Amino acid sequence: MIKWRKWARELAIFVVVLAAFSWGMDQWRKPTPPEIMHLPDVTLISGQTVSLAELSADKPLLIYFWATWCGVCKLTSPMVEGLHSDGMNVLSVAIRSGDNERLMRGMTAKGITFPVVNDELGRLSAEWNISATPTFVILEQGKMVSSTSGWSSAWGVKFRMWWADARIFSNLAD
């Protein structure tokens, strides 16, 4: 019984240290999106122009910064596709991943259908100060309310989206 308590204590300490490290890394690599009045309209590879402020006005918007050359993105893109298929408000930005034709071919081959902006030269990601891929940014009413970079689980992203949605409803009640 005493060994069990020792292992439980060690595990709890490990989880706290890991959470603190993860939080610290997120703070260090935190993007800096433009102010709401300067949020750019973006053009999807389909040719459609969308407003980030409008997409995040009624429900939180997950912006997924990724790249075709990113190893971790190969693990997270199918998860983001699943969230998109489940009806979550998703927009992605492919950073320096080739021209539109090449990007579309790669996405089609992998069964990825979420909306994507091709940041072929990396200008948009530089404007947002994205320093790591993948990076997940959640906008609520045009303002960033959450961000994380690196691998994230579907449940982690869902929780962040739920939390942002709960914030919207609490703001409406005020």
Image: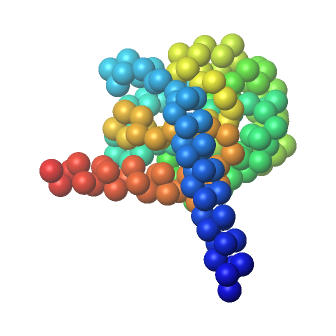
Judge whether 86 appears above or below 91 on screen.
below
Q: Residue at x 84, y 43 (%)?
A: 109
Taking the spot 74% from the left edge, 40% from the top edge, the residue there is 73
Q: Position of residue 74 (x, y in %)?
A: 79, 43
In percent of width and height, residue 138 lies at: 47, 41
Residue 168 visible in the shown view? yes
Q: Is residue 132 above or below residue 73?
A: above
Q: Quadrant of residue 151?
A: top right
Residue 161 is left or right of residue 46, and the answer is left
Residue at the outermost bottom position: 1
As drawn, the residue found furthest toward the front would be 2
Q: How is the image coloured?
A: rainbow
Quadrant containing the N terminus in the rendered view: bottom right
* Figure check: 122 above or below 60: above
Residue 99 versus residue 93: which sits nearer the camera?
93
Q: Residue at x 57, y 55 (%)?
A: 16
- Side (left or right) of 64 relative to 96: left
Q: Is there any visible trace of residue 101 in the rendered image?
A: no
- How many labels, in total? 0
- Percent of width and height locating residue 31: 52, 27
Is 26 or 124 nearer to us in this picture? 26
Q: Residue at x 40, y 40 (%)?
A: 145
Position in image of residue 51 (x %, y %): 43, 29
Looking at this view, is 32 or 43 the one in front? 32
Task: Looking at this view, name the residue that lies furthest to the left.
Answer: 174
Quarter of image, res 47: top right
